[in-house]
């Protein structure tokens, strides 16, 4: 075994270019496979995972404050079938402007805490509200984290109150376009503006539209029939995200398979070339007493040594690239809520890449063991 190890070491050092090629190819293959596997995991039911993590609302309901008092709405949280509720939150629909730039009509909700039992808001940039005179924009309204560059906005309502943009955030179930402090009365109770109250619900039964509607009817049974003036069901958001992720899955799978195929082909080519070019060396090795198995080990080892190093570096590189890429992927699915690359991907990808390199190298080197010493 010492002679075989020395022969492998010598071959790797003497054939620097083939070793470098194999190492770089396996590195790129491992990094690509890690990224593809993590993208595949991220593309598998992204809405469901983000919805559970952020305690999304099954229903976002808007009520007429003249027909449903705050106390009556709060009581709906204790109705049968309601597992969690948040609100009531004062809300208005108002235009927002950043100087000459019109952001359009926005659903502005008064909310002091981004957490809570339902619809935990995630921050993309900046911070949450700490008092009146501030506003947090939704990702859709702000056009991304750069919405902070607006500086301050003016609400297009009587009095034209000015609001400083302090953050950009997102709701998994799209419950608002912007949030202000609950005591921001010059916005939420402005004269001449249609005011509303918003409630957010999670139900024990919400697997389809009929179940959600039935649970909501039970929750609102004690309110006047015309108290509700707007409803938004989570299933509409879920279907939209699932359609997007479903389109991406075949391409992600093809991406991972292609990386492994290219790696295998290049390793096979390099090892086969080394065997063909090494007839004289193989004959001398066998004449010196190397068995066919040892000769195969030497030529396979020339690929496995740089392949192992390339695989380890590739997995590390794949993890380093995964966090920003997964963040962009989540944003594309509109489900940003924290990036946590699964560690089991590394444990699965590294052995798979090494196994493919090893099997290919042994298969390509098998011919060397059958070449006679003469």
Image (cartoon, rainbow, N blue to C red):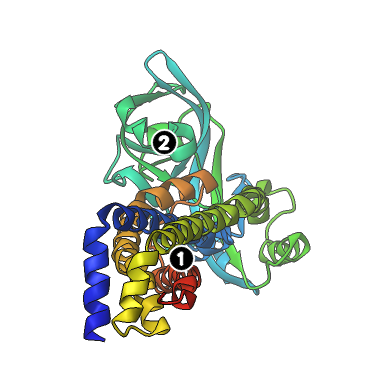
- What residue sits 51% from the left and 29% below the top? 94
Q: Distance between the Cα atoms at labels 2 and 1?
A: 26 Å
| Observer-nearest of 236 and 331 | 331
User: Of marks 2 and 1, which one's residue comes earlier in the chain?
Assistant: 1
Residue at figure coordinates x 46%, y 55% from the top left:
266
Q: Which residue corresponds to the image point at 46% horizontal and 23% vertical from the top-left?
A: 157
Q: Is residue 175 visible?
A: no
- Residue at mark 1: 117
Q: Quadrant of the N terminus?
A: bottom left
* Figure quadrant of the C terminus: bottom left
Q: Is residue 291 above or below residue 373?
A: below
In the image, residue 299 sits, relative to residue 114, either above or below, namely below
The nearer-to-camera label among 2 and 1 is: 2
Q: Residue furthest front?
A: 374
Location of residue 36 in the rendering, given as x and y in whole percent from the top left corner: 49, 56
Residue identified by numbered label 2: 144
Q: Residues within 10 Å of mark 2 (few under 14, many from 20)?
A: some
């Amino acid at each position: 075994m010492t002679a075989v190890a020395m022969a492998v070491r010598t071959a790797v050092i003497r054939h620097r270019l083939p070793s470098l090629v194999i190492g770089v190819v396996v590195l790129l293959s491992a990094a690509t496979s890690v990224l593809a596997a993590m993208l595949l995991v991220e593309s598998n039911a992204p809405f469901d995972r983000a919805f559970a993590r952020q305690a999304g609302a099954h229903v976002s309901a808007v009520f007429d404050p003249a027909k449903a008092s705050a106390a009556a709405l709060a009581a709906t949280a204790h109705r049968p079938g309601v597992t969690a509720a948040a609100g009531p939150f004062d809300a208005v629909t108002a235009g927002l402007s950043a100087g000459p730039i019109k952001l359009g009509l926005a659903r502005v909700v008064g909310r002091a805490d981004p957490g809570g039992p339902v619809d935990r808001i995630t921050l993309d940039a900046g911070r949450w509200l700490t008092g009146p005179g501030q506003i947090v924009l939704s990702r859709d309204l702000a056009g991304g984290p750069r919405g902070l560059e607006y500086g301050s906005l003016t609400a297009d309502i009587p009095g034209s109150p000015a609001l400083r943009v302090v953050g950009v955030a997102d709701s998994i179930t799209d419950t608002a376009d912007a949030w202000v402090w609950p005591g921001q009365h010059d916005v939420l109770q402005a004269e001449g503006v249609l005011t509303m109250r918003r409630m957010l619900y999670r139900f024990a039964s919400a697997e389809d539209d009929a179940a959600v509607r039935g649970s909501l009817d039970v929750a609102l049974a004690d309110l006047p029939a015309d108290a509700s003036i707007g409803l938004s069901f989570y299933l509409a958001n879920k279907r939209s995200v699932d359609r997007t992720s479903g389109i991406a899955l075949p391409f992600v799978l093809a991406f991972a398979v292609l990386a492994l195929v290219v790696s295998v082909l290049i390793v096979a080519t390099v090892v086969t070339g080394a065997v063909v070019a090494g007839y004289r060396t193989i004959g001398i090795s066998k004449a010196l007493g190397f068995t066919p198995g040892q000769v195969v080990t030497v030529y396979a080892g020339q690929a496995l040594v740089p392949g192992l190093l390339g695989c380890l570096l590739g997995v590390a590189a794949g993890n380093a690239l995964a966090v920003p890429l997964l963040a962009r992927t989540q944003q594309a699915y509109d489900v940003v809520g924290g990036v946590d690359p699964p560690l089991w991907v590394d444990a699965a990808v590294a052995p798979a890449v090494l196994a493919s390199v090893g099997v290919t190298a042994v298969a390509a080197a098998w011919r060397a063991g059958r070449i006679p010493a003469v």
